Image: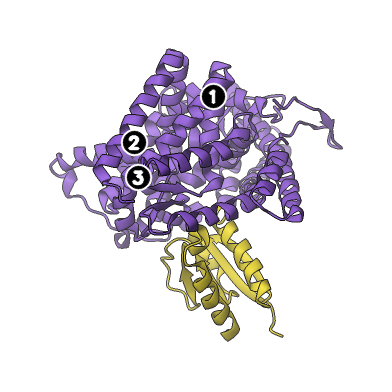
Amino acid sequence: MMGQTMLPSAAGLLLATPLLLAPAVLVFALLLGTKPAAAVRACITIAVAMLGLNLIVWLMWSNLSEAAGAIAARTGFVRDVMDLGWPSAAAMAFGSTVGLFVIPAAIGINLVLLRLELTRTLNIDIWNFWHFAFVGALVAAATENLAMGLAAMVLAILFCLLMADWTARRMQSFYGVDGVSVPHLASVQIYPIAVGVNWLIDRIPGLRAVHLQPEDLSQRLGFLADPMVLGFGIGITLSTFAYLDLADPLASLHKIALCGVIFAAAMLILPKMAQLLMEGLSPISTAAQGFAEKWTGGREINVGLDSAILIGHPSIMITSALLVPISILLSLILPGNRVVLFADLTVIPFVIAMAAPVVQGNIFRLVVIGVAMMVPGFYIAGHLSSAFTTMALEAGFTKPAEATQITSIVDGFIWPSFAFTEIATSLGWVGIVMAFIVLGAGLFWSRHRHGFKA
Amino acid sequence: MMGKKKVLVVCGTGIATSTLVALAIKTEMAARGIEVETSQCKVSEVEAHCADADLIVSTTQVPAKLDKPVIVTLAFLTGIGKAGLLTKIEALLREV
């Protein structure tokens, strides 16, 4: 495990940056036949991205904590879990000890299952392997047991392949993407919720007739999807409640404006750093494409891709724009909620995308499904926040002085994160073995159902 | 010698899949002697960003009607049909 090496910087900020992923990627890239110069560049890119992510996580974490603390002291309105967003979660997951194993494990398990014809998905979406590492690192943090974390990581890999196979046909016909499936944890998790809620709405007279299609609604909700504007708005609002002081208006207005800029900057820079991390992983992604071409020769398989390819559908764009204010409202009114939503307000399209095929793009039903996922999500996030925070620190991220706990919608709000952690903490190895049996049975059932053709 | 061509690469995040596509287009077009400058954006921002683009390549459906050539493709991600697509992009960029 990476220790907390302290590097004093000019600003006096003590930085510890998770760097182990960088040399690991250098080795994988060279093994997969990347030219040494490109592999070294990828390695440096990852190290730089990790440093950038650590800085920006610290900036968000400290400022959100301070503002939430000031609001709590003033009004008694306590929110002590900060949403630092999926790029932070991805960096923590890849930067964890479990994260070092995730790339060879996910590729290896996938190839074995393809050989055994237990899956028809070849997952080449290397970037989103971070979700598997996240589940593993979270379980490792919650149980203080690395082996259990690695087992949970394997469970997450199996779960996503199973879900990708299960959802493939409907997803392909709705989105018009042949030969593709989506083994993306944050996206597949909504599918069972969508099936359940859809079944329920079909049985409620009145509601079942409500049908909003994309063209019924204005598409002018897009400004909410602009992360910088959204960040500025949230920053100004939070800091007004936290710092506005009528006795000293000028100083407090300065502080409020500064907070607006800090939060806008965080929203804008955070994904840019994730992009850098992604660029560093690209030699491995390119090599994975080579596998895809080889394995599709005469064989009926689906290529597993990122749900980013689905987001452009109008029903998803509009539903997400509606769910942003609804989610903020929920964060304010839900009793016992501890979460301040922030960085992951921009990823709502990902958590609902796989629901659209179930409801044929009906926006009313998509919003209801989104709410049905978000409401328990707040409590899941609160419940998992202490393990999430431990995971961040174990990966080497810098904890600010006034730190609260942390989460992210992706994957801190989703039921699989909760389920795998609960299984491991409450039932231990017995639970893990049971989960393997259930997922294994699911894969056999799925093979039978889809009638694999070699 | 042609001037630099501008390709706008679009996906759901403007980060995830579009980074892979942008890198692939840049490298492959450079190998064919076309200098390409790429930028990336989210599909919700495509109208605001497409003004000076010569070509738009997207990994997800582009809802807006744009007066630029648009290619929606997964070939850069799956690797399947990539060679044919590169030829098509090369031809388009030589035309504009």
Q: What whole-number distance in Å separates the C-alpha atoms at marks 1 and 2?
A: 22 Å
Amino acid residing under circle 2: Leu
Q: Which chain is yellow?
A: B
Q: What whole-number distance in Å separates the C-alpha atoms at marks 3 and 1?
A: 25 Å
- Determine whether label 1 and label 2 are within 8 Å by CB: no
Which residue has dot 2 on it? Answer: A443
**Mark 3: few, some, or many residues within 10 Å (few <14, many ≥20)?**
many
Task: Tell which circle, 3 or 1, labels the residue nearer the N-terminal end.
Answer: 1
Task: Tell which circle, 3 or 2, labels the residue nearer the N-terminal end.
Answer: 3
Amino acid residing under circle 1: Gly
Which mark's residue is nearer the viewer, 1 or 2?
Answer: 2
Secondary element at tag 2:
helix
Nearest the eye: A265 or B76: B76
Q: Position of residue B9 (x, y in %)?
A: 56, 65
Q: Is residue A14 left or right of residue A141?
A: right
Figure colour of chain A: purple
Q: Is residue A90 visible?
A: yes
Nearest the eye: A288 or A310: A288
Q: Position of residue A423 (x, y in %)?
A: 42, 19
**Mark 2: few, some, or many residues within 10 Å (few <14, many ≥20)?**
many
Q: Is residue A160 left or right of residue A25?
A: left
Relative to A292, say whether A12 is above or below. Answer: above
Amino acid residing under circle 3: Asp
Which mark's residue is nearer the viewer, 3 or 2?
Answer: 2
